[in-house]
Amino acid sequence: MLLNKDRLHARMAELQLDAVIATTPENVTYTSGFWALPQWIRRGPQAYVVWPAPGKGEAEIVTSTATLDLVADQQIWVERVRRYGAFHVDGNPDAKDPVSQRLIELQEAHDHGDALSALVAGITDAGLSRARIGIDEIGLMPGQLEALRERLPGASLVPAAGLFRNARAVKTPEEIARLARVAEIAERSIKAALGVAREGVSEVELARAFHAQTVQDDAFPVLGCIGFGERSALMNVQPSDRRLRQGNVIRFDVGGRYRHYRADIARIATFGEPSEEVRRYHRALLAGVERACELIRPGARVADVFEAAVETVRREGIGHYRRNHVGHGIGIDGYDAPSLTATSDEIIEAGMVLCVETPYYELGRWGLQVEDMVVVRADGVERLMATSGDLIVVAP
């Protein structure tokens, strides 16, 4: 199971909630294992998970008839499913395979017409129509929260997006295993991309090699910022026809998605020997990441980690270094809690998985970046990276 059930229940108890409702794609998958394709590829489609507090009933998925094949075909730990909307598929009563049989069974359930009607019915049937319910407000379309309040006048609906984000911050062993695997895939994909680096190759060609390796390793492309030379300083650089030349910096800020979980790592290579300035700046950035990792442990203040990372980079060679954050949590979302900022009041906890990073962008010259994924353990961090953040020199 992906869900950190104990942590979610503890947060629900703190807020005296009888149930919570997941609405965003990340939280629907997190609470149920159900990956609702339409939710993930465009705005608007609705799927929910109603998750009662202990002793308040069973969890239930609410989703469109058009996605019931995914319910039948995925490893989902929430058994109750409520459907809405028409989608016509012919069912053969002689079907023998379990997925088709399960889909036929799901399609025979009552159609509630539309998403909110199905959700209201689920809440009512669970005896929660007068309950205090936390709802992940971010996944709803404009006007839907107000409509729910009108249709459930006896219920108290309170925003709960922050509750879900907090619950997801500490990972289960299964989540950590998936994050470790996708981090490994990202590193292998960088190696594959550098394997085609030669004079005149384009950013697009490196990106193609990177993403091909990601897919070969059973993950899906998501993040692929790969830039050469002056383009490496573009924060969100997207691969172009820019050709690789001697002395160029190559910046990777990349990652894929493996079984719903994300990677986000950064490595720097140079095509040929780098200048002494590039070496010095890169060493400073690497020292900042290493210092942050030394401080990260349960009970550490996020703000203290930020300050130490920035001050280390300045002391080690980039005196004017500035950042708004030096990392973030990662999981089913690319930016989970916490965000490693100067103003954060969050405390590091065991089981968090963090991307620790120190990017530096100098427009017209180059961008440099070190970013590692780490797990917070009782005595410090466990790195998910097989490679170090050292500067990689590619021979012409």
Image (spheres, rainbow, N blue to C red):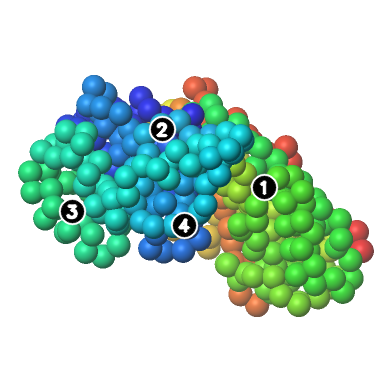
The residue depicted at 12 percent of the width and 43 percent of the height is 155
In this rendering, the label closer to the viewer, 4 or 3: 4
Residue, far left: 154
Q: x, y (%) of residue 106?
A: 43, 41
Find the distance from the CA under tag 1 to the CA under tag 2.
Answer: 25 Å
Mark 3 or mark 1, earlier in chain: 3
Mark 1 or mark 2, earlier in chain: 2
Residue bearing the label numbered 2:
78
In this rendering, the label closer to the viewer, 1 or 2: 2
Residue 88: mark: 4
Q: Residues at badges 2 and 4 in contact (C-beta under 8 Å)?
A: no
Q: x, y (%) of residue 387?
A: 74, 41
Find the distance from the CA under tag 2 to the CA under tag 4.
Answer: 24 Å
Residue bearing the label numbered 1:
219
- Give 206 or 234, whichever is nearer the viewer: 206
Tell whether 74 sits left or right of 192.
left
For label 3, the crowd category at 10 Å Cα-Cα, with few meaning under 14, some 14 to 19 and many 20 or more, is some
Mark 3 or mark 2, earlier in chain: 2
Q: Residues at badges 4 and 3 in contact (C-beta under 8 Å)?
A: no
Residue bearing the label numbered 3:
148
Residue 232, compared with residue 45, is above or below; it is: below
Q: Residues at badges 4 and 1 in contact (C-beta under 8 Å)?
A: no
Find the distance from the CA under tag 4 to the CA under tag 3.
Answer: 28 Å
Q: x, y (%) of residue 164?
A: 34, 41
Q: Residues at badges 3 and 2 in contact (C-beta under 8 Å)?
A: no
Does residue 99 appear anywhere in the picture? no
Q: x, y (%) of residue 85?
A: 36, 56
The residue depicted at 22 percent of the width and 26 percent of the height is 56
Indicate the amino acid at tag 3.
Answer: Leu
Q: Residues at badges 3 and 1 in contact (C-beta under 8 Å)?
A: no
